[in-house]
């Protein structure tokens, strides 16, 4: 009888310890992510407001003249100098859209930015690039070295909050079969243009 009582006490004590550990980890997690969540929630609200007039804005975009020779059905719609990070896609075999719009935006971006005790894998350094966005492709001009990403090759594009040196920046995440690209910009028009022409390519 006494041994059963001791076993019961041990089980209860173990259960209490587990609850305390889980509670402490949950508390640390919430404290660590509170600054990010605040910025992210504000950005999500900004995006919701933008959605109300997005179609009107996109319908009234005027082509921008540039030095590039374009085909008759291509037009430049956005130009800006932005900070870009190009990163090789370590999971090249997974070519499907994976966790696209069905998975909640907040948890996708949280997963990309944080773990509990350390930051997720570090991005390559950000570098200035002159970005040209047309209805067909994105051209990144980095010190006169040109990198082209076709709109039809983009698997995922989303507006998110990017963590850089413990600071939070509004930006856009792009994923192709071969790489991930993070772009710092607070201009929601950039991602909206990509979304529209990605949809038209399907």
Image: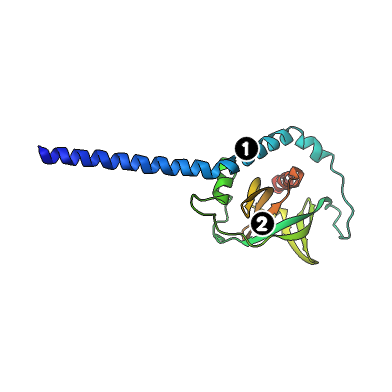
Res 87 label: none
Relative to residue 115, is residue 178 depicted above or below? below
Quarter of the image where one finds residue 101: top right
Quarter of the image where one finds residue 165: bottom right
- Residue placed under numbered mark 1 in the picture: 41
Pinpoint residue 171: horizontal percent, then vertical percent: 69, 48
Q: Residue at x 77, y 34 (%)?
A: 53
Q: Nearer the viewer, mark 1 or mark 2?
A: 1
Q: Secondary structure at mark 1?
A: helix
User: 10 Å neighbourhood of mark 1: few (<14), some, or many (≥20)?
Assistant: few
Pinpoint residue 161: horizontal percent, then vertical percent: 64, 46
Considering depth in this image, is 200 or 80 the residue closer to the camera? 80
Quarter of the image where one finds residue 91: bottom right
Distance Cα–Cα, label 1 vs label 2: 23 Å
Quadrant where the N terminus sits is top left
Pinpoint residue 116: horizontal percent, then vertical percent: 49, 49
Q: Is residue 10 left or right of residue 41?
A: left
Q: Secondary structure at mark 2?
A: strand
Q: Is residue 98 visible?
A: no
Q: Is residue 44 visible?
A: yes
User: 10 Å neighbourhood of mark 2: few (<14), some, or many (≥20)?
Assistant: some
Q: Residue at x 56, y 61 (%)?
A: 90
Considering depth in this image, is 1 or 56 the residue closer to the camera? 1
- Residue placed under numbered mark 2 in the picture: 181
The structure's colour scheme is rainbow
Q: Which is nearer the N-term, disc 1 or disc 2? A: 1
Q: Is residue 14 left or right of residue 86?
A: left
């Amino acid at each position: 009888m006494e041994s059963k009582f001791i076993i019961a006490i041990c089980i209860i004590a173990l259960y209490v310890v587990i609850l305390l550990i889980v509670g402490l980890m949950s508390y640390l997690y919430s404290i660590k992510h509170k600054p990010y969540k605040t910025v992210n929630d504000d950005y999500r609200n900004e995006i919701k407001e933008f959605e109300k007039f997005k179609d009107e804005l996109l319908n009234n975009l005027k082509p921008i003249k540039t030095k590039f020779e374009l085909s008759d059905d291509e037009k430049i719609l956005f130009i800006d100098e932005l900070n870009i990070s190009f990163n090789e896609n370590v999971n090249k075999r997974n070519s499907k859209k994976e966790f696209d719009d069905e998975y909640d935006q907040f948890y996708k971006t949280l997963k990309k930015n944080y773990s509990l005790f350390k930051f997720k894998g570090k991005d390559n350094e950000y570098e200035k690039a002159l970005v040209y966005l047309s209805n067909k492709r994105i051209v990144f001009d980095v010190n006169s070295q040109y990198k082209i990403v076709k709109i039809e090759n983009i698997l995922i594009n989303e507006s998110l909050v990017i963590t850089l040196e413990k600071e939070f920046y509004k930006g856009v995440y792009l994923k192709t079969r071969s790489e991930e690209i993070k772009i710092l910009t607070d201009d929601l028009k950039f991602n909206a243009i990509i979304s529209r022409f990605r949809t038209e390519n399907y």
